[in-house]
Image (spheres, rainbow, N blue to C red):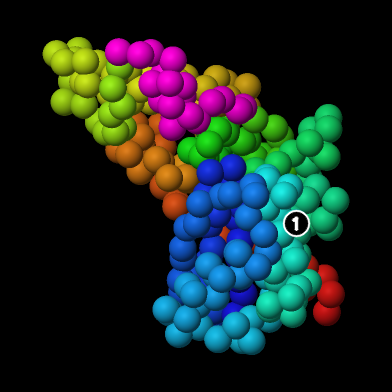
């Protein structure tokens, strides 16, 4: 069994892969102050509830954009799983050409989803990841990573508005019945939903113009299904793209070590 761990700014996604299939997936809240022993309690309880034996894991692959959480998860793997985890970074020997000016600055999450998307769907393509930030990553027809776009994520943008506007009450993001809202709640929902939808489509169109070719667009992340529901620009929604990418990276490394 392989444990795939994606440590994001807001959530930690864990996936258990066995027989080339994702058997279990969970999400935890990212806490920059949490220690290895505390993560071990959470993870071991998830294993226990799902009848998973910790000693059955042969490898752990970690993508982290939160250094403190990444360090503590590494300690947890060493002490409780007795495994030295594979940490995704631009320095890792991966089957991807990072065709950018400063490859050392590329987030592990963006490398992982680019690898996964090309492995699953071929290229050229654009990966749109709706996370704490919304990222757009361009992958060439030969699998090379070409760069992309980073914009504030939907949830943090909503939080910023509600924190600064005293008279606006918090609302959940959902697709409103129409663009023109007739209540304050509908106006806010419309602004965020259609605002981010149009932003996404506009950026996709501009990336396509620069690539000057027909590309597939793959969406992933927590809000991908909601936003993609009303967009003809999204070809595929794949919520498991990160876990698939971490497993692909493990397979690449295992093949090279044979």
Q: Quadrant of the N terminus?
A: bottom right
Where in the figure is residue 16, as x and y percent of width and height?
A: 53, 72
Q: Secondary structure at mark 1?
A: helix
Tell me if residue 114 is in the magenta stretch.
no
State which region is magenta: 149-167
Give the residue displayed 30% in from the left and 17% down from the top.
168
Give the residue displayed 28% in from the left and 29% down from the top.
171
Does residue 94 appear in this view? yes
Does residue 117 appear in this view? no
Q: Depth check: give the residue in front, 152 or 164.
A: 164
Q: In the rendered view, would you say 59 is above or below 211?
A: below
Q: Quadrant of residue 35?
A: bottom right
Q: Residues within 10 Å of mark 1 (few under 14, many from 20)?
A: few
Tell me if residue 158 is in the magenta stretch.
yes
Q: Depth check: give the residue in front, 153 or 36.
A: 36
- Please state if 164 lies on the left or on the right of 115 as rendered: left
Q: Quadrant of residue 98?
A: top right
Q: Depth check: give the residue in front, 76 or 125.
A: 76
- Please state if 123 lies on the left or on the right of 91 as rendered: left
Where in the figure is residue 251, as x and y percent of width and height?
A: 69, 70
Q: Quadrant of the C terminus?
A: bottom right
Give the residue displayed 60% in from the left and 64% down from the top.
39
Where in the figure is residue 107, as x and y percent of width and height?
A: 70, 42
Where in the figure is residue 223, as x and y percent of width and height?
A: 40, 40
- Please state if 90 lies on the left or on the right of 198 as rendered: right
Give the residue displayed 56% in from the left and 71% down from the top.
41
Q: Quadrant of residue 255?
A: bottom right
The residue that mark 1 highlights is 71
- Please state if 222 lies on the left or on the right of 183 as rendered: right
């Amino acid at each position: 069994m392989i444990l795939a761990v994606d440590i994001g700014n807001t959530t930690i996604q864990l996936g258990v892969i066995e027989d080339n299939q994702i058997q279990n997936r969970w999400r935890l809240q990212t806490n920059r102050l949490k220690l290895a022993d505390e993560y071990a309690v959470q993870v071991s309880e998830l294993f226990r509830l799902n009848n998973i034996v910790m000693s059955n894991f042969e490898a752990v692959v970690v993508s982290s954009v939160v250094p403190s959480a990444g360090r503590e998860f590494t300690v947890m793997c060493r002490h409780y799983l007795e495994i030295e985890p594979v940490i995704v970074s631009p320095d890792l020997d991966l089957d991807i050409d990072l065709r950018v000016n400063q490859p050392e600055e590329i987030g592990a999450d963006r490398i992982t989803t680019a690898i996964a998307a090309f492995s699953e769907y071929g290229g050229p393509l654009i990966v749109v990841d709706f996370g704490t930030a919304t990222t757009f990553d361009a992958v060439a027809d030969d699998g090379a990573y070409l760069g992309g776009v980073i914009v504030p994520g939907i949830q943090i943008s909503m939080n910023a508005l509600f924190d600064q506007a005293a008279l606006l009450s918090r609302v959940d993001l959902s697709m409103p019945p129409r663009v023109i809202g007739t209540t304050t709640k509908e106006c806010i929902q419309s602004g965020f939903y259609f605002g981010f939808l149009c932003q996404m489509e506009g950026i996709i169109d501009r990336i396509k113009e620069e690539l000057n070719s027909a590309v597939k667009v793959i969406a992933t992340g927590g809000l991908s299904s909601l936003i993609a529901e009303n967009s003809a620009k999204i070809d595929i929604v794949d919520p498991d793209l990160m876990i698939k990418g971490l497993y692909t990276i493990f397979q690449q490394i295992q093949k090279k070590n044979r």
